[in-house]
């Protein structure tokens, strides 16, 4: 049974348990007021980029490089050296193919593996657990919080950004939005073309202060985050 049939059967089962027919054609409400829509109006692209960088800097354990595509290899070489990364796991993403990510990493001398859904999943999970660095391509950035938004599914494995101690996100400056309001509107516009299995919002490194209010990094995810902003 494919995913669509499984979903239909599940929803039919729920409706049957509720003792009523399936409901279709739900119309979302139209809100008369949008109190946050006016925020950051008038800001240009450069303003949003500077705000994004400033908010990332405030998160600690986070670094930003703003470069043209042609300098990706140089920045990756710097990042792998700084974090002493010897093994890297990256998404299977067509944007990385056009950036020649594999060749760039090969020149740094690290062991590189791509999260390919055609390969053994348990083996990929094991590799992700011991890899020094994970690399993904962010769909959006949020200037207000320094957040990157990942669309997970297929070759864009979620563990790539979750298990390695260092997470590197590549993001186009043109994909930086003012705040969550515009990001959600963008997601809604993508509904007809289909949404990914998971939409992941990541704001800086993993942190927790549960134990005696002492702030600790990297407990539930990467302890260090490096953002590569592409200017072109």
Image (spheres, grey):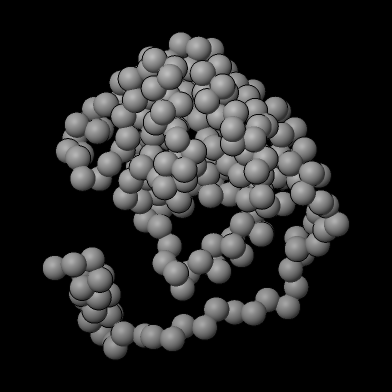
Vertically, is 159 above or below 111? Answer: below
In the displayed structure image, the side of residue 144 where residue 167 appears, left or right: left
Tell me where residue 9 sits by quadrant: bottom left
In the displayed structure image, the side of residue 12 where residue 212 appears, left or right: right
Vertically, is 129 above or below 152? Answer: above
Q: Nearer the viewer, residue 19 or 38?
A: 38
Q: Nearer the viewer, residue 56 or 134?
A: 134
What residue lies at 33% left-to-right and 20% top-to-bottom?
111
What residue lies at 41% left-to-right and 47% top-to-bottom?
94
Q: Position of residue 73 (x, y in %)?
A: 52, 25
On-image quarter of the N terminus? bottom left
In the displayed structure image, the side of residue 48 where residue 164 appears, left or right: left
Q: Is residue 126 visible?
A: yes
Q: Position of residue 199 (x, y in %)?
A: 46, 52
What residue lies at 65% left-to-right and 43% top-to-bottom?
232
In the displayed structure image, the side of residue 164 where residue 1 appears, left or right: left
Tell me where residue 128 sits by quadrant: top left
Q: Position of residue 41 (x, y in %)?
A: 83, 58
Q: Position of residue 48 (x, y in %)?
A: 76, 45
What residue lies at 52% left-to-right and 44% top-to-bottom?
138
């Amino acid at each position: 049974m494919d995913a669509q049939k499984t979903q239909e059967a599940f929803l039919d089962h729920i409706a049957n348990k509720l003792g009523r027919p399936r409901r279709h054609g739900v119309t979302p409400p139209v809100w008369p007021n949008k109190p946050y829509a006016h925020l950051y109006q008038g800001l240009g692209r450069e303003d949003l980029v500077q705000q994004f960088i400033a908010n990332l800097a405030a998160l600690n354990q986070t670094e930003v490089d703003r470069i043209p595509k042609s300098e990706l290899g140089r920045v990756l070489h710097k990042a792998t050296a700084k974090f002493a990364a010897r093994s890297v796991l990256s998404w299977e993403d067509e944007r990385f193919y056009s950036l020649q990510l594999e060749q760039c990493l090969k020149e740094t001398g690290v062991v590189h593996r791509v999260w390919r859904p055609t390969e053994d999943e348990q083996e990929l999970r094991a590799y992700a657990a011991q890899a020094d660095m994970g690399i993904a391509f962010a769909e959006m950035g949020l200037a207000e919080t320094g957040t990157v938004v990942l669309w997970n599914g297929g070759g864009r494995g979620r563990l790539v950004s979750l298990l390695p101690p260092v997470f590197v996100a590549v993001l186009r400056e043109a994909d930086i939005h003012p705040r969550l309001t515009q990001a959600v509107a963008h997601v809604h516009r993508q509904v007809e073309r289909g949404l990914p299995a998971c939409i992941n919002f990541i704001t800086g490194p993993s942190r927790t202060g549960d134990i005696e209010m002492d702030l600790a990094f990297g407990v539930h995810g990467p302890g260090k985050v490096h953002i590569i902003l592409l200017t072109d």
